[in-house]
Each structure stands twice: as C-alpha cells, then as structure tokens.
Amino acid sequence: MKEHPSGRAVDPRQELAEFAAFYSETVPRLVTFLICQGATLADAADLAQDTLVEAMPPVWQTLLQPYSWCRTVAYRKLCALWKRGVPPVGDPELAGSPLISPNHDLDDFEQHQDFLYWLDQLRGDRQRAVLVCTYDGATTDETAELLEMAPANVRSTLRNARESLRRSRTEHTPGGDRRDR
C-alpha cells in the first residue's frame, strides 16, 4: 500500500481503476474542448493523450480537480503547438485513431458542428476561448487563470461573445441565408 499525500493509504489497483475510468470519460470531452478552441481532430487527440499521460499515477494522487487540471494542461499544450507553427495534419485518414473508441456515440459529437459554425462567427480568439471554457464547465476564476485574464474581463468578454452570437444568429442561418424576421 502506498500513501496518499493526505496521509490515507492508497491501493495501487484501485488507483489505476479510478484513473482508467477517468481517462475513458475525459478523452472525448477533452478532445471536443480542444476542437472547439480551434485544434484539428488529430492535434486534439494527440494533446488529450499527452495530457492524460502526464496525469497518470503518481500525479493522479495529487490532483484535487483532475478535469480542470487536464483542461488547463491541454490548452497550454495547444497554445505551445500554435506558437511553434505546427501545421495541421492534412489527411485525417493518415492521422490514425482519434482516441475515441469505435463504440463511442459520435452523434453527440456531430451535433457540435453547428456550435463550431457559430464559434467561427465570433470576433477574436479571446471571445471564442472564453465561451468554450464556459461551455466546457469552467468557472470564471478557472477561465481567468487559464487565459491569464482578470475575472472581470472574463465576464465582460463572455457577455460580448454572447451578444455577438445573438446578433449573428438573428441575421444568418448556418447556410448564410438571412432569416425572415
């Protein structure tokens, strides 16, 4: 038996089982989060995998909010990838498995395509990043820390993003036609 930093005993088999369950639940959510931030499917899958490898035991024992930690690490990895100027993978077939099991229900994933269209209508990367973090369940403070913004600026940016989306949705449909008012 190992000991958890809190002083309680940890069964390594139980710890691995808990991590495996977290991994299975987190991969699709983290990949979706990264795609909504603008990553390609292949990059999002790679970044999610890299992040979860870093979260494996013994680090796993120290994480108080594991998904929040993974979201932060994966987002920072995505920003580092963009700073290096790594081009997206051209042919998805050559990219291999996106780490989502074949029996995973992709209908939910496909329903996000409309959401991705509207994200592309936003002005600026900050509005997109704040809205995606909020959509993913991050608190204002978590978003502020992740994006290195003041919480008040996060709230203001979110308000502006929502207003921008409201204006866009009343003027256009996803096909680009004007709606009848």
Image (cartoon, rainbow, N blue to C red):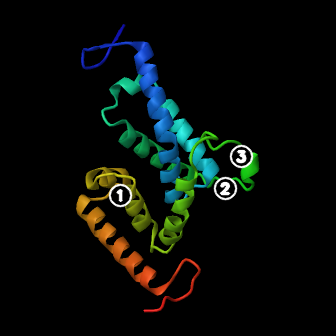
Query: Residue at 42% of width from left, 25% of height from top?
Result: 18
Task: Point out residue 153 in the picture as x, y percentages from the top left corner.
Answer: 28, 65
Q: Is residue 146 visible?
A: yes
**Amino acid type of disc 2?**
Pro
| Res 83 → quadrant | bottom right
Residue 18 appears left or right of 104: left
Question: Mark 2 or mark 1, which has the lower sequence index?
Answer: 2
- Element class at badge 1: helix
* Above or below, comparing residue 111 to residue 176 in the picture: above
Is 53 above or below relative to 108? above
What crowding class fits label 2: few (fewer than 14 Cα within 10 Å), some (14-19), or many (20 or more)?
A: few
The amino acid on which the numbered mark 1 sits, given as a three-letter code, is Thr
Residue 103, percent across and down?
61, 41
Gap between marks 1 and 3, in whole Å? 29 Å
Identified at 30% across, 55% down, the residue is 144
Is residue 2 toward the left or the right of residue 45 in the image? left
Residue at image mark 1: 134
Of labels 2 and 1, the one closer to you: 1
User: Which residue is nearer to you in this view: 9 or 110?
Assistant: 110
* Mark toward the start of the polypeptide (1 vs 3): 3
> Disc 2 designates what residue?
87
Residue 16 in the image, given as x and y percentages of width and height: 46, 21
- Marks 2 and 1 sit apart, C-alpha to C-alpha, by 27 Å
Would you say residue 55 is visible in this rendering? no
At label 3, the amino acid type is Ala
Residue placed under numbered mark 3 in the picture: 95
Which residue is pictured at 75% across the width and 49% down the height? Answer: 93
Assess disc 1: are there few (<14), some (14-19) or many (≥20) residues with their C-alpha within 10 Å of its C-alpha.
Answer: some
Element at label 2: loop
Question: Could you say which is closer to the camera, residue 14 or residue 158?
Answer: 14
Q: Position of residue 2 (x, y in %)?
A: 36, 10
